[in-house]
Amino acid sequence: MTEEDITKLRALAEAATPGPWIAEVDAFDHEEISAVVADAKTNLLFTSGCDVSMHHSNDAWSTEDSRLRDAQWEKAKASQAMRDATYIAACSPDVVRGLLDRLRDAQDEISRLGRQLSVCATEDVDRGNSEGSGGWTPGGL
């Protein structure tokens, strides 16, 4: 991942709707069940069809109708669209910013340790490795 990628990703996260985000299934038109991603205020952010149609009854609603409806909802919850929606919700802007902050902190720590190692190596060379143990002594770092 380049610095340009990181900068672009941070800008996208800053411009997006704040998290947390949630993933659910819903039926907007009472025909097809969809996977949805919404923010904490339940504003719809993303929707994807689950390829699962709503169960309809031409007669009085029965226990069997309820069982069929529940089975369709469970199928929708197990769909690829729902897995994608769950992943998208997990990658809300606050999560992405947090990951980018941790990446920056890790890079800073690597730089700090690299500088410290360079100082130790320089001190070792300056001592001329005259201590018989390659210049290293316990506690010497």
Image (cartoon, grey):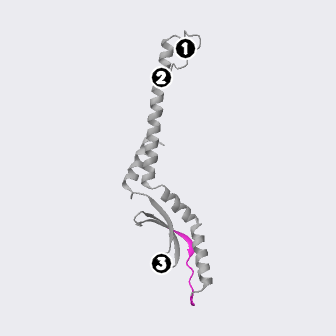
Farthest residue toward the bottom?
A: 59
Relative image position of residue 58 (x, y in whole percent): 57, 89
Left or right: 98 as drawn, with respect to 76: left
The disc labelled 2 sits on which kind of residue?
Ser
Q: How crowded is mark 3: few (under 14 residues within 10 Å), some or many (20 or more)?
A: few
**Toward which corner of the image does residue 81 lie, by quadrant?**
bottom right
Res 29 label: 3
Q: What element carries label 2?
A: helix
Q: Which of 27 and 136 is in front in this view?
A: 136
Q: Which of 2 and 64 is in front in this view?
A: 64
Q: Is mark 1 on a helix, strand or loop?
A: loop
Relative image position of residue 7 (x, y in whole percent): 40, 45
For the residues labelled 2 and 3, say whether their Cβ atoms are less than 8 Å apart. Answer: no
- Rounded to the nearest angstrom, the CA distance separating label 3 from label 1 is 76 Å
Q: Does the magenta stretch include residue 55?
A: yes
Q: How crowded is mark 1: few (under 14 residues within 10 Å), some or many (20 or more)?
A: some
Q: Give the range drawn in magenta.
A: 48-60
Q: Residue at x 46, y 21 (%)?
A: 119
The disc labelled 3 sits on which kind of residue?
Asp
* For marks 3 and 1 on the same chain, the one whose residue lies earlier in the sequence: 3
Res 118 label: 2
The disc labelled 1 sits on which kind of residue?
Gly
